[in-house]
Amino acid sequence: MKEYGSIAAVEGRNITKDFMVGGTVSKVLKGISLKVMQGEFVSVMGQSGSGKSTLLYILGGLDTPTEGSVYIDGTDICSFDDAKMSRIRRQKIGFVFQFYNLIPNLNVEENIMLPLLLDGKKIRDYRGQLDHILDVVGLSDRRKHTPRQLSGGQQQRTAIARALIGSPDILFADEPTGNLDSRTGGGIMRLLEDINRDSGQTIIMVTHSQEAAESSSRIITVRDGVLA
Amino acid sequence: MNIIIKYILTNMKERKVRTVVMLLSVILSSSLLFVSYSIGASYESAQQKMARGMYGKASLSVTALDDSAELDDNTVPDIPEIQAEAGLRKQAAMYSEGGYYETVDLVSSNLEQLNRINKPRMSGGGSITGFSGRQIILPDRFSSKFGISKGDTVTLRINDIPVSFEVYGIAAYDTLFLRQTRGATALVPLDVLTDIVQQTQKYSEILIEPADDVTAGELKSCLEEKLPQDLYRVSETVDEAQIAADARQKSMPFFLISFFALTMSVFIIYSSYKVITLDRLPVIGTFRSIGAEEKTVTSILLAESVVYGLTGGLIGIPVGTAILKVILHGLGDRLAQGIEIPAVITLPAISISIAAAVIVSLLSSWIPVRRAGRLPVKEVVLGTVEEKKRPVQHTVAIAAILGIISIVLPRIAPEKMLYPAGGLSLLGLIAAAILFIPSFTNLAARGMERLYGTLFGNEGMLAARNMRDNKNVTQNITLLFISISAVISISAVGNFVTSYISDVFQGAELEGFADGHMEEDFIRQVKELKGIEEVLPIHVLEDKVQGEGGSFTRLEATDNLKCYSSMFALHYSDGKESEKAVSAFGENERVMIISEDTMKKMGLTPGDKISLSDGTYTAAYRIIAGYKSRATDVEAVIPSYRAVQDFGAEGYDFLAYTAADADAVMVQIRNLFGDTPNWSRTVEEFNADAASTVSTFLQPMHSMTYFILLMAAVGIVNNLLINYMQRRRAIAMYKSAGLSGRQNVKMMLIEGVSAGLIGAAAAIAVSYMEIQTIFTVAGPKISIRPDLDIAIFLAAGAMGIVITAAGSAVPILKSRQMKLAEEIKFE
């Protein structure tokens, strides 16, 4: 059993999330509490509509809980205003989505550098880091291509590179292989495994795939809005 | 079928914002078309009214050719072809105040008869009762000019005898008071005029209104048969065809507005539909996968556009009527001294506007809808549809060829084909610019990327980068350029029309003139006046000289043709002819310059020799040049020496001058005239008189420009909303990568302002070319080129930038309410 740091990379306390559906309140998350330690690779599984993606977005600060709180670096991010939250996204968090979410008219390099550009950094100061990350994700020869000119797997690699460029504390991945064939999906999972193993990157991943989940160090399951 | 209608209505209901924007653009374009069409018609009607002036509903007039012919209430036979008749008695009079002379034409009539044909409209409302004795009704333009009020006494000189009248009331500058020539018309009781001036006939003229369904021509023939032709002349009061042609020319800006309104509407709906069809691809895929044919999919989407068109068109009419009333009501308020413009709402205006709304919606949506219908089912279902890209070089080449053809076409088209060539040129210029804008935007965005990176940091760089290859941005720029170029063209043409109509002396050097008889000594005294610069005395021969093709209504003579040419802005048919003419005039040869219209009328060309005669002496004159001028309606000019020698011209009858202070000189000239009747004005004063009516008359056109801007704003907000709808996922992606709200606002504003800048630059260039086309087409009818004001271009450009920047507020506000997780979660 691998040992992880004693500090929680992210902690959710008593998270609830309600949605209004056709005038009635639907409780998607019903008081979930969990801790993910630094360096951990956690898979979140559950059936469709169980609330696993909602949990991931709340932990990653893309959504806010109806009740409860989320701590990153020991600070409750739920009370953050837009500016603070945006800074957390640029500096502490990396996100990988099922549909890649790349900016279509920016090329691979520009997409990857986006969090740094938004943080006021200059591309020229991060050339070395960019080359390294392109090397890691195997896209050095595709750096000037736009997302349309890439395959699904290459787009997802670009998204992973973008998520990692700012050396974030936590990488959130929402079904990163959900839109890929099994072979390409396998390649992406190996890449995430390598990143977690080699650089101790904390990863929290939502997946449907048992095979993908087996790459992680811990699997948690959400069922009917609570942890099973 | 019910399911399809339900589907269409559900779509419209669910996408409220888009439906509102689509409807708004259709409503605005149809109402704008309706307003411009109706204003054109109203304007034409007012023009007809103005041209008719004294004649009102009368189409014919009967005058006596001989003193022995009776002209009274029994002259015109009582026949069913006549609806009404009114006898008029006319008498010239002169009003003077402080050396300022004004011709006043006195008119009197049986009021009962007059009311039927051309009822005078009193300024304060009400009708004329108890109008008798030495009373007079003056038009408000005259009374306000001289500070005359109801109850005042005015003295007029009739046949050099002073006659005083009590002012019965003030009439609107309308009906019989309206006139095309200088001076004023006043109404006096019939018996008073009969007492003052002894005349054989009771009336000077009898006006006749034909019965319904009887044309002026038919009635004229009928009367000519019944009245002895050696005693009476029956003539048509106005040339209807000419009036319609003049009105059409003056209402040109309104139709220009309609043209731009339609072009903008097509673009708004086309771009909206492009997005709608893209948005509907999954639904189209579903329909196709369950067996719907290509034409079924096309019909469903087209049916939706018809619903937009029909609803928008139907709402557009009452909205347009309200706008029309507001514009004309506002105009009425300002036209206290002007002409009442009726709101003419015709069935064609209503049908054309609704039809245009439906057709424009249908045609604009047809291309994107048909393209969507033709997509391979597999690609649609799998969501792998990609728009085919045409090589940039091809597009730029097509744009360049189209642009060049559009610029050249009106310049090489034969005169008869000028209007169609002009229309095609305007469309071609807009189409060329639409094709060129994506490449231009990419180029500009590349330059901006570096600049903005330095000026605004990474957000600036990203905003500029985001503009490259971004169809939404190019659509915005296109819409903006169409609107700004419309505003610029309409303003420039409108200002030109205003100044063209009101400032006939544009380009002419004279700053003042005097119309009255002057001897050499008078001219010498004028030349010695303080502040006078240049003096040009002119001999005037009115209806005195006969040519071979007819008589010259007005022929003038000067000894300084160079000065004459610049004073009256003569435009010679051939530039080289002017020098020859000046030199020949200097040598007192028997030469003449002749106006192009007169040449045409008399079938003459430069180089021809014609015999001029005053009935006692005949001499052959060589036509040395042809000219056009708006500052003078003189038909021909000969050297002074020859006018004196050949036709016995004595003294001068007109004088043009330039001076440091034209007003001061005018006062001195009036003093020199003393009690001698004269008409002395400065050009500024003359123009102010003309402009007071004309500029107010053309006010609706300026109001319409604001509606064009409103439409542009709606179009841009529409585009920005569409942009936002398409981009909200991209914004969500940016946000997920750490874009803050402040950064988002900064990027959107930079993008909006940059799009505005590019749009304004394109609009300035295109509108300049459009104006050149418009004036090339109108060129043969006008003799001057437009004096383009750079301020109009810059102001419209700046306005466009402000609109785009302000338009960014909508997507900015909407992106603030964005639920990030929801935007990102679903493809």
Image (tube, coloured by chain):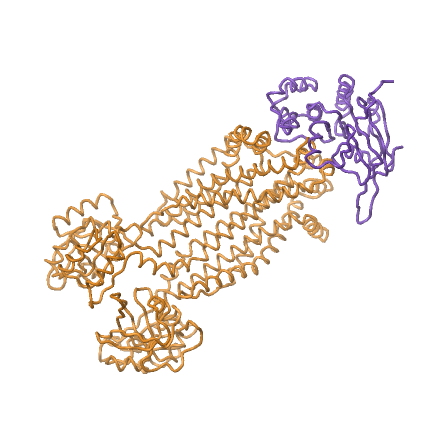
Chain colours: A purple, B orange
Asked whether, in this view, residue B635 is left or right of residue B57, the answer is: left
Instruction: Identify whether B824 is placed above or below B8.
Output: above
Question: Residue A166 is drawn in which quadrant?
Answer: top right
Of residue B172 and residue B393, the one placed in the foreground of this image is B172
Q: Position of residue B351 (x, y in %)?
A: 54, 59
Image coordinates of residue B152 in percent, x first then y, are 34, 75
- Can residue B391 be seen here? The reply is no
The residue lying toward the viewer, choosing from B742 and A228, is: B742
Q: Residue furthest right?
A: A228
Left or right of residue B721: residue B381: right
Relative to B511, say whether B119 is above or below.
below
In which quadrant is the N terminus of chain A drawn? top right
State left or right for residue B204 relative to residue A144: left
Which quadrant of the figure contains the C terminus of chain A? top right
Task: Tell me where residue B548 appears, x and y as whole percent.
Answer: 18, 58
Give the quadrant of residue A7. Answer: top right
Q: Is residue B763 at all visible to an observer of this figure?
A: yes
Q: Residue at x 43, y 53 (%)?
A: B253
In front of the other: A227 or B433: A227
For the residue pair A42 and B206, the one nearer the viewer reads as A42
Q: Is residue A210 left or right of residue B459?
A: right
* Vertical order, A63 against B591 (above or below): above
From this view, report whether residue A60 is shown above or below residue B255. Answer: above
Tally of marks? 0
Rendered location of residue B139, percent (x, y): 36, 70
